[in-house]
Amino acid sequence: MSGNQDQIDYWNGPAGQRWAEAQESLDRTLLAISAALLSFVAVKSGEHVLDVGCGCGTTTLAYAEAAGREGKIVGVDISGPMLALARQRAGSRPIQFIQADASVHPFKAEFDVVASRFGVMFFADPAAAFANIRKSLKPGGRLRFVCWRAMMDNQWATAPLLAARDLLPAQEPPDPNAPGPFAFADSARLNGILADAGFKNIKIAKLDSEMRMAPNAREAAQFSLGIGPLARASAECDDATKAKIVMRVAEAMKKFETPTGVAPPAACWLVGASA
Ligand SMILES: C[S@@+](CC[C@H](N)C(=O)[O-])C[C@H]1O[C@@H](n2cnc3c(N)ncnc32)[C@H](O)[C@@H]1O
């Protein structure tokens, strides 16, 4: 037992479905962050790569491209709906997708790289999870991932929530370290988790980027209702309330409009370590 059942239920329920449906717009939104991650991971021809929390497979496909025919690429995720899309997108490429909890899956020490785009912040016991993930690396193999800094530094997340605040059901103040998108905001805590898991040469660097959410503020508002903290907070709202939320959030997102779309700032960590 990993203690991750809540997350397994979450990512196999409506949220996983919404993520699969939003794959194309999400990938457009994350384009700049993904480019930074891919050059940081720097997969070389022939490398063996494990993509943790691979979701709909976008980064997994990119690693396969970089590793070429001699490479070995595996994506692991708990979400059935997202993996179904990942497998469909991979077609006949020799990519293996495993539906499993990465915190307890019995990996063999066969990978040069473990990478993740926002897929490692959801473990109930992060040090135990990373210790298990470390076992998948060859000696000296590298860990490379991107995760969010604090929610208050990520206006793509806070602006929609603040705009809709009085229309949302009352919520307990969140535990900042609880499994979830912002669980690794505290870099000292993250460093400790990775050290406890046995990783060496840990480096946690700021990545200041953007979320290219949509061509206009109204679509950015609709995106926020499907993906991110507002989506979680508004899940139980009725359709009339959601319509009001969209109007409010659209107004709030106007300040992030640029000539090429709505692009609020995004604050991430690029995290590297070796086994
Ligand atoms: C924020 S999404 C990111 C998905 C994908 N990497 C992307 O960038 O589009 C988080 C992903 O982590 C997966 N996940 C959460 N807990 C997991 C676990 N214990 N083992 C494997 N995957 C997990 C979820 O199912 C989900 O696909």
Image: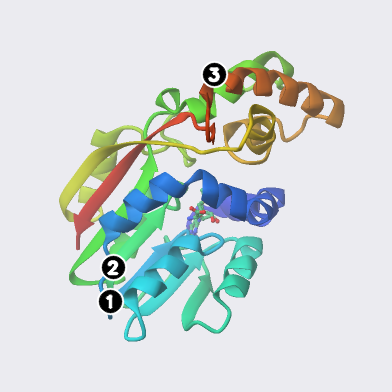
Ligand 1 is within 8 Å of the C-beta of the residue at disc 1: no
The circle on residue 47 is 1
Disc 1 residue type (three-letter): Glu
Position of residue 183 measured from the top left corner of the image (x, y, whole percent): 41, 38
Q: What is the quadrant of residue 177 in the picture?
A: top left
Q: Nearer the viewer, mark 2 or mark 3?
A: 3
Nearer the observer, 149 or 216: 216
Mark 2 to mark 1: distance in Å? 7 Å
Mark 1 to mark 3: distance in Å? 43 Å
225 to 44, vertically: above or below: above
User: Is any atom of residue 29 visible in this view?
Assistant: yes
CB under 8 Å between discs 2 and 1? yes
Secondary structure at numbered mark 2: loop
Determine the residue positioned at 84% across, 30% down. 238
Determine the residue positioned at 65% across, 57% down. 20
The circle on residue 241 is none
- Residue for badge 3: 255
75 to 70, vertically: above or below: above
Determine the residue positioned at 28% across, 64% down. 134
Left or right of residue 171, residue 127 in this image: left
Q: Of callouts 2 and 3, which one flags the residue occurring earlier in the amino acid sequence?
A: 2
> Residue at the top extreme?
166
Secondary structure at numbered mark 3: helix
Crowding near the residue tagged with mark 3, few <14, some 14–19, many ≥20 C-alpha atoms within 10 Å? few
- Residue for badge 2: 43
81 to 194, vertically: above or below: below
Q: Of callouts 1 and 3, which one flags the residue occurring earlier in the amino acid sequence?
A: 1
Position of residue 30 measured from the top left corner of the image (x, y, whole percent): 48, 46
Q: What is the quadrant of residue 247 in the picture?
A: top right
Nearer the observer, 3 or 234: 234
